[in-house]
């Protein structure tokens, strides 16, 4: 009887310890990835992928501690999924929390002119913007871009300027 009580008490201690570890690791990684910037998640290089694998291994060791049982792993996974669901509910309920966690889209080119300080802050260069402009809109030069926006996901959206020839054609066509 005493042995069963000790096992149950030990399991409770391990369970609480695992949930607390999972929570702390989740919050820590959320802060670190938020600080590192949006662009790291949008375009993963080989270096970023290796870093992600190393972080995953360190995270696993930190969450599970000394207990590598399936029960502890399942408890850690359930804790992480529960935290993720809780964060999504909080983001849905409070837009301010959503902006804090996910950030806001940021304009990095206005009428063909890229503000240097914004680009430096986001670690984006003109080649990144022109690459997105070519692949998304077929644009070749910076002066062909009305707006370039770094989205919340870290991807770059390109808005081309409105072509006056199309507007004139539509006005002429509809006036007949």
Image (cartoon, rainbow, N blue to C red):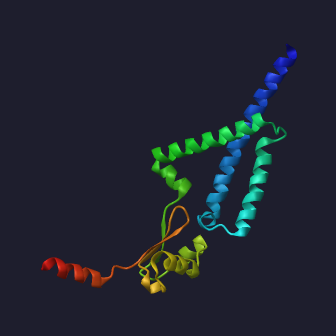
Query: Looking at the picture, how far across and down is residue 113, in whole percent?
Result: 46, 82
Residue shown at the point (53%, 81%) measured from the top left: 130
In the depicted structure, whether residue 46 falls above or below residue 63: below
In the displayed image of the protein, which residue is found farthest to the right?
3
In the depicted structure, whether residue 172 falls above or below residue 20: below
Residue shown at the point (56%, 81%) measured from the top left: 126
Q: Is residue 34 left or right of residue 163?
A: right
Quadrant where the N terminus lies?
top right
In the depicted structure, whether residue 95 falls above or below residue 119: above
Q: Is residue 158 left or right of residue 126?
A: left
Q: Within the image, what quadrant is residue 33 found in?
A: bottom right
Quadrant where the C terminus lies?
bottom left
Residue shown at the point (74%, 32%) measured from the top left: 15
Query: Looking at the picture, how far across and down is residue 119, in whole percent?
Result: 56, 75
**How many callouts does the rendering have?**
0
Query: Looking at the picture, how far across and down is residue 167, in whole percent?
Result: 26, 80
Query: Looking at the picture, how far across and down is residue 36, in whole percent?
Result: 65, 63
The reply to whether residue 151 is visible in this rendering is: yes
The reply to whether residue 115 is visible in this rendering is: no
Residue shown at the point (76%, 44%) measured from the top left: 63
**Camera-nearest residue between 115 and 50:** 50
In the displayed image of the protein, which residue is found farthest to the left?
176
């Amino acid at each position: 009887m005493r042995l069963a009580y000790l096992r149950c008490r030990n399991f409770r201690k391990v369970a609480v310890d695992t949930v607390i570890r999972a929570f702390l690791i989740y919050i820590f990684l959320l802060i670190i990835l938020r600080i590192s910037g949006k662009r790291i998640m949008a375009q993963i290089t080989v270096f970023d992928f290796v870093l992600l694998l190393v972080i995953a291994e360190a995270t696993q060791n930190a969450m599970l501690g000394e207990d590598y049982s399936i029960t502890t792993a399942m408890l850690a996974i359930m804790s992480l999924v529960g935290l993720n669901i809780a964060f999504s509910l909080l983001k849905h309920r409070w837009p301010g929390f959503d902006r804090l966690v996910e950030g806001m889209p940021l304009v990095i080119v206005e009428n063909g002119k890229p503000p240097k300080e914004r680009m430096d802050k986001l670690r984006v260069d003109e080649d990144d913007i022109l690459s997105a402009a070519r692949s998304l809109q077929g644009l070749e030069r910076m002066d062909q871009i009305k707006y370039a926006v770094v989205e919340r996901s870290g991807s770059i959206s390109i808005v081309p300027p409105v072509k006056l020839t199309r507007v004139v054609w539509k006005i002429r066509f509809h006036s007949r």
